[in-house]
Image (tube, rainbow, N blue to C red):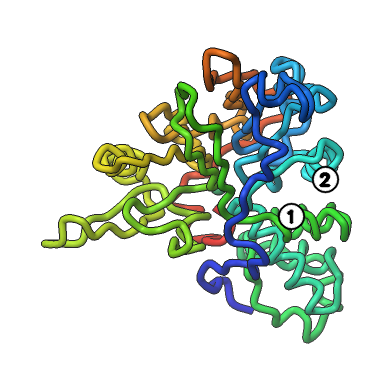
Amino acid sequence: MTTKKPSNKVFPITTFISNLPTNLIPQPSLSSFENGPQSRRLVIVGDIHGMKKSLENLLEKVGFDKAKGDHLILAGDITNKGPDSSGVVDLAIKLGASAVRGNHDNAVLDAAAEVAANGGDFELFKNLAATETMSENTTPPECLEKAGPAANIKLRHGPTSYNTAAQLSAHQIEWLAGLPLILRIQLPEDIPSSLGNNLVVAHAGLVPGVPLEEQDPHAVLHMRSLTRKLGEEDELTPDESFGEEGWAAGWDRWQEKLTSRTTVVFGHDAKRRLQLGKYTIGLDTACLYGHQLSALVISVTDAGIEHQIVQVDCADAPVVPTAPAKEDNKAAVDK
Ligand SMILES: [Mn+2]
């Protein structure tokens, strides 16, 4: 068995980009009068990572009410690492939430598929992955000695992803697998908007100047910064490292050059916490590590489209952060 893991893999994509259905998009009160509730809001929540109590507290603080037409959108990394991924997915399904896939959701899906393709024994994979992280002097669990040929499996993930995958039901896995990587939201036009009219949700980021359809799926799940190709001023490549500035700064500069501008709502960058750019809103405020869980709440009034940030303190048992460099080497897929 080797400890070297294959490079990051994107679990098969059923939908790369989806459009939020028109009936879920907040409309000015006059036009929505005949079509349904007038107080529709979009509530977009950053990286939850199975922190269910924090999510419940945030929805309570927002006054989230599905019956009044509020719609929940999750910006990816809904699952993994935290205490109750299954409970969070259950709640998302119950509330009819929309969401995009995060790199951790992707890892959980891939781990589930890997276990299923190799006999379906989650306990074995959890133990194998845990053994990889043990010191050389540690005796492997008895079940591994009995595993025989199965112990030659080259693991694609760390123990956390197998643990989470084992907790999710087939229905929950199916829901996660069906999530798009990019969610496009066309806000009402011809009314003032604090966000513009084109809104996109993507977990990690997008490369400026590249059409949504041509974005690299791996980068959409993992990127944090942009690298400029030497001598090619407009050629930017996505990078997973934090870089001197986040990709969002480059996105904001690019939008200034355009007539039709797009605001991106994203997560993934817990280190930079809340990011309020001109055309970028970063919502990963490190709830997993004991900080805050954040929501972007978009409402439409007669005055136009307005948005605000609502936050709660972490209400779940936090996870101790690992040093990024060390984690990079250990389990590239699970960052
Ligand atoms: Mn992430």
At horizontal 56% and vertical 47% (from top left) the residue drawn is 184
Residues at marks 1 and 2, CA–CA distance in whole angstroms: 11 Å
> In the rendering, at what x and y percent does residue 187 appear?
55, 35
Give the residue type at disc 2: Ser
> In the rendering, at what x and y percent does residue 63 appear?
75, 16
**Disc 1, SS:** helix
Give the residue type at disc 1: Leu
At horizontal 20% and vertical 56% (from top left) the residue drawn is 234
At horizontal 47% and vertical 24% (from top left) the residue drawn is 193
Tell me if residue 16 can be seen. Answer: yes
> In the rendering, at what x and y percent does residue 7 appear?
51, 71
- Quick one: which residue is furthest to the bottom in this view? 149
Quadrant of the rendered image containing residue 185: top right
At horizontal 80% and vertical 60% (from top left) the residue drawn is 174
Above or below: residue 143 compared with residue 274: below
Direction from residue 70 to residue 328 in the image, left or right: left
Tell me if residue 316 can be seen. Answer: no
- Where does label 1 land, which residue? 176
Quadrant of the rendered image containing residue 131: bottom right
Q: Residues within 10 Å of mark 2 (few under 14, many from 20)?
A: many
- Name the front one of labels 1 and 2: 1
Direction from residue 118 to residue 294 in the image, left or right: left
Exactly how many numbered labels are in the figure? 2
Quadrant of the rendered image containing residue 256: top left
- Where does label 2 land, which residue? 86
**Label 1 close to label 2 by CB (< 8 Å):** no
**Disc 2, SS:** helix
Q: Residues within 10 Å of mark 1 (few under 14, many from 20)?
A: many
Above or below: residue 207 compared with residue 54: below
